[in-house]
Image (cartoon, rainbow, N blue to C red):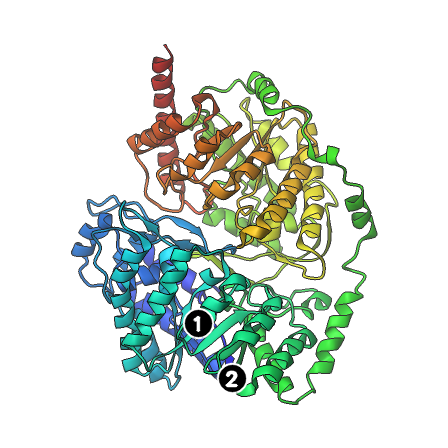
Amino acid sequence: MLTNIPGYPRIGSQRELKKACENYWAGKISLERLELTARQLRKENWTLLQDAGIDLIPSNDFSYYDQVLDMCVTLGVIPSRFRGLQQTFANPTCPELYFAMARGYQKNNFDITALEMTKWFDTNYHYMVPEFEASQQYALHHPKCVQEFKEALSLGITTKPVLIGPVTFILSGKIKDAGVGYTQLLEKLLPAYIQLLAALQEAGAEWIQLDEPSLVTDLEPAVRELYHTAYSSIRQALPAVKILLTTYFGSLEDNTALALQLPVQALHIDLVRAPEQLDAVLSALPEDKLLSLGVVDGRNIWKNDYAISLGLIKKAIAQIGEDRLLLGTSCSLLHVPYNLEDETALDPEVKQWMAFAKQKVAEVIALQQIAAGDDSLLAENEKVMNSRKTASSIHLPEVKARIKEITTADTQRHSIFPHRQVLQHSVLQLPLFPTTTIGSFPQTTEIRQLRADLKKGIITQETYNADIRNAITETIYRQENLGLDVLVHGEFERNDMVEYFGEQLDGFVFTQNGWVQSYGTRCVKPPVIFGDVQRPEPMTVAWSRYAQSLTSKPVKGMLTGPITILQWSFVRNDQPRMQTAFQLALAIRDEVKDLEDAGITVIQVDEPALREGLPLRKSQHAEYLEEAVKAFRLAVCTVDDATQIHTHMCYAEFNDIIEHIAAMDADVITIETSRSQMELLEAFAHFRYPNETGPGVYDIHSPRVPTVAEMEALLHKAAQLLPARNIWVNPDCGLKTRKWAETEAALRNMVTAAKNARIQQLAVSF
């Protein structure tokens, strides 16, 4: 059996790529230095996989920012608003255009907004959304993947280039012009794809991986036809090219026959998320196709249970033989950290149950060896699996008992929203179009150093607390000077919106270097939930109480919701995920009650990942959404009617879950809408969303400062869709990644836009 890795992390074990990119943007290093860092990282990955014994080593899984953005630039899918910049920087390898599409561009007499960004299927990885315009002409614009294949070849390593398949690429984007359909778009894109595949074949690529995860989703008949057209055209044009069609994140189900009929040499399936699909695939696999078994989890950090994986492998061997099988990870290892060996402070008991990217590669090789008859690694693995099942550190009887005591009353507010709204308006006394932010303010170098110094013992807890109080004080005064209506304390004590809470909850452990890419250079270090969760003591109350003491304006208490903590952690896989979600909800519920008792009248419980957790198949939506909404309501429904509950969601399509968002019954929801020009708000309007809404009026993921006119225009659109009395004014997301100068400039413009909107609305009213 050959071994196959669909993709490998690219940021570097110490986030070398993040640091290099950000230093390049800041003008601290040259383009040559950035490219040198990239080459070093690629070489390290290729060498590691070759030394481990992997047969199909990926290339072109590297990206400076995002693999979907790479495909856009490769094929010339460049929106018209970038054409002037494209002409200015005519060299297609110049990064100015590439990074402008990712981050926006506001210099050299240009002012260009970035591409939209949304989640990659049901992961926490954000990709740049392609924009397809009728005027675009597609061709091999930038042969990055060919260059990287040749780069590996020069090192004596033959790789398997990885590309997003044509149908998934189309489905991941947005068609901007009416009258252009998928069929016409595919016809225009296919010659560029074929040109690219031909260039790879000419360069010496034996295998080419085309990722088509859309095959594990519900597909319309027209989309199924796209698959037939795309792959038949590729096979006709390039009969000798060997394609490994790669699916992941779920089961093929009703797309099984479609996937097996496509004229490709091999099919990869995810047997971690969907082991049940193996029987159907084996029974219908054509004799001329190879099958790649994704048996090692590419999305979680728990050690592989060899006995379970071997059961699947042996079943496949018995039916089609070893020669037609490949063994690999379920998906790209992009979603897990680099190397468990870098963790020197983890609890040894928990560490023995874990595997990061490097260890998962070793697991693939180990399974290959065990399947070939070497049982020496099997006994040790079985010992580790048994130790986890019986560990007393995992199970807390008092937590399990509390879960059993949950009643329907625990998930209901005392009164319906219209009644609560009257009380809240009376208490808060806010103007029309009230302004606020999503929670965090810039995490400066000084603030990050402060936390690092406390961790290292360089400063005392008392010194740290005093400095954090000073940062909160300054931020409250800044917000008052800007004229914001509902303030926040800034979250300077928080390293991450999930990690911060996990550090104060039982059942979590944390890594030193467990970084994974969220988007671009934004890296997160997900907590690890290994056992039952509970809150030993209040987590945020002291900081919120202090911030509120500085101002007569309301200050929001800021919490992360149970589903987001669940989604953005590496979650234990020894019990149902929703069991863990309800444990988290009870912990947050205790914190919400303590904040209210401390006099906090506005409490925000963020759930940006609720949509992200939606199963890829519609048949599974209802059960997930019912339980996710229940978890949120369990967390917040302890408060009185006059206490205003906010939540925040970002970078998601809301149309298919709007009823369940309404069922969450938050008094105010803030959402990302600026990059889509309020397009996402239409779902709330069509549904007649009853509660209050804060559509984001500017994009915090870009350093550009939006004008007052831009934000006024967006508010005007919002007021045409929703009742003015229900509209809040806020940025798209938290401001921790921004600088103070651009933050204050943007917020000043935002407050001015809100004031102008009030005047306009009052004029209309009279």
Q: Secondary structure at mark 2?
A: helix
Marking on residue 363? none
Q: Nearer the viewer, residue 512 or 717?
A: 717
Q: Position of residue 311 (x, y in %)?
A: 67, 77
Q: Residue at x 45, y 56 (%)?
A: 219
Q: Secondary structure at mark 1?
A: helix
Asked if residue 746 shows in the view, the reply is yes
How packed is label 2: few (under 14 Cα within 10 Å), some, or many (20 or more)?
Answer: some
Q: Position of residue 316 (x, y in %)?
A: 60, 80
Q: Which residue lies most toward the top here? A: 766
Q: Position of residue 440 (x, y in %)?
A: 50, 40
Q: Which residue lies most toward the bottom here? A: 373
What's the amino acid at mark 2? Arg
Which mark lies nearer to you, 1 or 2? 1
**Residue marked by disc 2:** 324
Q: Nearer the viewer, residue 663 or 91?
A: 663
Quadrant of residue 364 within the rendered picture? bottom right
Taking the image as shown, residue 626 lies to the left or right of residue 60, namely right
Marking on residue 261? 1
Q: Nearer the viewer, residue 284 or 21?
A: 284
What's the amino acid at mark 1? Gln
Q: CA distance from mark 1 to mark 2?
A: 17 Å
From the image, which quarter does the N terminus lie in? bottom right
Quadrant of residue 703 within the rendered picture? top left
Taking the image as shown, residue 164 lies to the left or right of residue 663, namely left
Asked if residue 474 shows in the view, the reply is no
Q: Residue at x 70, y 46 (%)?
A: 582
From the image, which quarter does the C terminus lie in? top left
